[in-house]
Structure formats: C-alpha cells, structure tokens
Amino acid sequence: MIRNKNVLITGASSGIGEALAVYYAQNGAANLFICGRNAERLAKVREACERYGAKVSAEVLDVTQREAVKNWVERCNVSANLNIVIANAGTGTINETEEAVLNTFNTNVNGVINTVLPALAAYRSRPSRYHGDMAVAVISSMAGYHGLPTCPAYSASKACVKAWGEALRPVLKREGIRMSVVCPGFVRSRITDQNTCPMPFFMEAPQAAEIIARGIEADKGIIAFPWPLRLAVWLASIVPNCLSDLIYGRLPPKA
C-alpha cells in the first residue's frame, strides 16, 4: 500500500519523475522528498503534489554531486524513515561528443549510485524495528537490453544500471529490501521531446508512472513495458550478430 509511505524521487522536475511524484501524492503518500535541477519546474511539481494533501520537501539538486546527494538522502531519512526510493534522474543527448558521453554516464550511472548507496546506508542505520519496509527502484530503459546506434552512450549507461540493479536484488532481499529495475519504452519526457527517431508504442508519463508504482508495490524484479517493445528488444538481443547488424544498420546513428 502506498498510503502513509515516505517516498524519495530524484529527477522529479519533469517526465517520469514528475508523474511519479504526482501519482504517489494522489494515492496517499505521507511524505514526498523530491529533487531536480530546475527550480521553477520543481516548484510547480511540489505545488501539484501538495494539492493532493502530501507533505512535500523539494530540493534543487544535481545527482552527480555525490556529497550533496548523500547529505540530502540522510536528511530525508532523519525526517521520515524512507519506504520507497526511486533513482529516476537521467539524461539523454542528441550527439555523442566526448563531453556529452561523459555527462550521460555521470548522470545516468553515478547519479543512480549516488542516490541508492546513501539510501541503503540510511536503512541499515535504523533500529531493527524499522527494518523490512523498504523498496528501491532504479530507472533503466528498454535501450539497456541491447545497444542502439541511435543512442550508444545512453544505451550503455542504462545497461549498466540494469545489470547493477539485477545483481543487487538477491543481495538486498536478505536484508528485507526490495529492489526493482524499471525499463520503460518511449515515454514522454524532455529526452524524448528531442528524439527525431521513430518511437513505437509511445506512452504518456502518467500511464508509465502508474505501471512503475504498481510494479514496485508488487515487488517485481524487472518492470519492463510496454510488452510488445520488450519482446522486440529481447528478440534483438538473441538474434545472430549478422542479423542484428542488418537491422540496426538501417537506423541513423547520432553524431
């Protein structure tokens, strides 16, 4: 049940993060801790969530800043024992310059690590009577199943997040911590708004947020959607290289 839960979400100023914050507020979360880099957009999300009666703490924060994120997560957990932590903040790019590639990995990989590790440490520091009610979700992508020539750095960064989350799940389960890896397809966001490639099975952010929240509540290890796209990327990951080269070779690379 979401009601009365304390939820932390990174990258909540737009896209899936914004939709998740609103969804949890609508469904009775007691405390919402949200962060994002854009102060104006984050303030609007906070106002939207507060209209549903949630107590919201919003922090302007860049998830690549390790110490700042650690301090924020610790403060949030002191304020209210965290029940759900969603490492959502991410970025994409329309080019593959050295700077863009490094920024993509720094945000999509280090940003997730910077969020999850302090959250786990905070959970472990609680008195044992507060253990057993903790869920962590990391946002990967369908692009994490197979490298796409349209977004090499993005694909690789999301593959890293997917593998890390999958490997952590059985380890954390022993401590009573639930881990979910979220692999959305094409969902409306500031990233997809700049995408000029075909986006099959395109989905609006509120619909994606509901799928994600329900999946976390059900303790699903992998929350991948929509299913036709999941099937397609799975097939692409098992076909011989000569065939995948032919298929993906027809897609325009980003340069």
Image (spheres, rainbow, N blue to C red):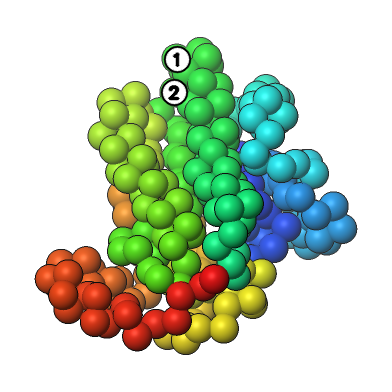
Q: What residue type is labelled 2?
A: His
Q: Which secondary structure, mark 2?
A: loop
Pinpoint residue 191: horizontal percent, then vertical percent. 61, 69
Q: How far apart are marks 2 and 1 (CA)?
A: 5 Å
Pinpoint residue 82: horizontal percent, then vertical percent. 57, 33
Picture quadrant of residue 22: bottom right
Picture quadrant of residue 27: bottom right
Q: Is 131 placed above or below 142 here?
A: above
Q: Which secondary structure, mark 1?
A: helix
Q: Nearer the viewer, residue 5 or 106?
A: 106
Q: Which of 218 and 178 is in front in this view?
A: 178
Tell whether 152 sits left or right of 84.
left
Q: Mark 1 points at which residue?
A: 128
Residue furthest left in the image: 240
Which residue occupies 31% across, 64% down? 146
Q: Nearer the viewer, residue 210 or 70?
A: 70
Tell whether 63 sits left or right of 120.
right
Count the marks. 2
Pinpoint residue 71: horizontal percent, then vertical percent. 70, 24
Q: Is 198 placed above or below 88 here?
A: below
**Is the residue marked by circle 2 packed among few (<14), some (14-19), or many (20+) residues within 10 Å?**
some
Which residue occupies 47% across, 18% down? 124
Which residue occupies 41% across, 54% down? 156
Q: Mark 2 points at which residue?
A: 131
Pinpoint residue 210: horizontal percent, then vertical percent. 50, 65
- Tell me whether the residue at label 2 lies in contact with that at label 1, contact meaning CB atoms closer than 8 angstroms: yes
Which residue occupies 42% across, 85% down? 200
Tell whether 166 sits left or right of 251.
left
Residue 205 in view in this figure: no
Q: What residue type is labelled 1?
A: Ser
